[in-house]
Image (cartoon, rainbow, N blue to C red):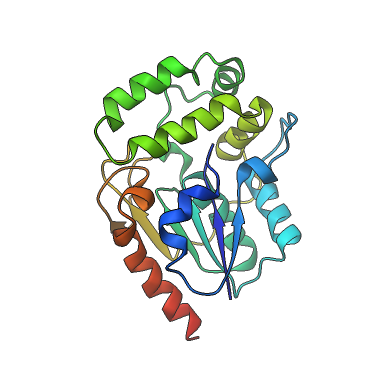
Amino acid sequence: MRIIFISGFGEDEFIFDKIEKALPGEKLFLSLWKTVPDTPVKKLNVAEFAKSLVDRFAIKSSDVVIGHSAGGWVAAHIKNIVGCPIIQVSSWTDTHKVIVPFRNRHVIYFAAKTGLYLNRFVMRQTIKKFYNGKPSREVFEKVFTRILTGNRANAVNQLRLIFNPYPAEITVAPDLRIHARKDSIVRFPDEEFYEVEGDHFSLYSYPEQVLTPILDLINHHAKK
């Protein structure tokens, strides 16, 4: 059994630093920055991208995939292909749960590409409104700065994984959903979920709470 971690939009493997050492077995860390193309791919979609990860990293039904945010969205499509257990942390199976200032995907991509929305002013205002004085401020600032300084075509491609139409509907459900009600980036699920304190970055701010249900699921899976 491998545990495969998929980080979210703008994130890197560090997002799992507070929980991964407590988990058993072989581990594989997948970052969208390293697996998504650095040149524009307008038709990129989450279903085909998930299939490329399955093929490239030989993901099997015996693996367990843990995805944070957009990584959980990718994980859902991986399960759709191979049937492996997946854990979504601060994620979704309905893109309408993602909180954005406008719903038109082309406007989102343009604003991200040109910096009209993803800029330092927006970062400062978001910190002031949602993260000031919270343990998650550091990680939010780190992720947002990575987006600002990273390859913009790659960042837009990551957004395409979230908002582009995809050919295969999800016919499976996550084995575990972990979410905080104060998440200001993704609304909490309509389905049953394990509630934790904090916000979108609870796995970094409250790792002990996030670990509890994950360990239960992994231990149960390992006994099969």
Image-quadrant location for residue 79: bottom right
Quarter placement of the N terminus: bottom right
Q: Can residue 189 be seen in this view?
A: no
Image-quadrant location for residue 127: top left
- In front: 103, or 118? 118
Q: Residue at x 59, y 55 (%)?
A: 77
Q: Residue at x 54, y 74 (%)?
A: 25
Q: In this view, does 128 lie above or below 58?
A: above
Task: Report x, y in % for residue 86.
Answer: 50, 63
Q: Which residue is drawn at 64% across and 62% down?
A: 81
Q: Can residue 116 be seen in this view?
A: yes
Task: Report x, y in % for residue 208.
Answer: 31, 61
Task: Report x, y in % for residue 148.
Answer: 55, 24
In the displayed structure image, the side of residue 86 where residue 126 appears, left or right:
left
Count numbered badges in the picture: 0
Image-quadrant location for residue 207: bottom left
Residue at the extreme bottom: 223
Q: Which residue is drawn at 61% across and 31% down?
A: 155
Task: Report x, y in % for residue 85.
Answer: 51, 68
In the displayed structure image, the side of residue 12 where residue 59 appears, left or right:
right
Q: Is residue 145 above or below residue 199?
A: above
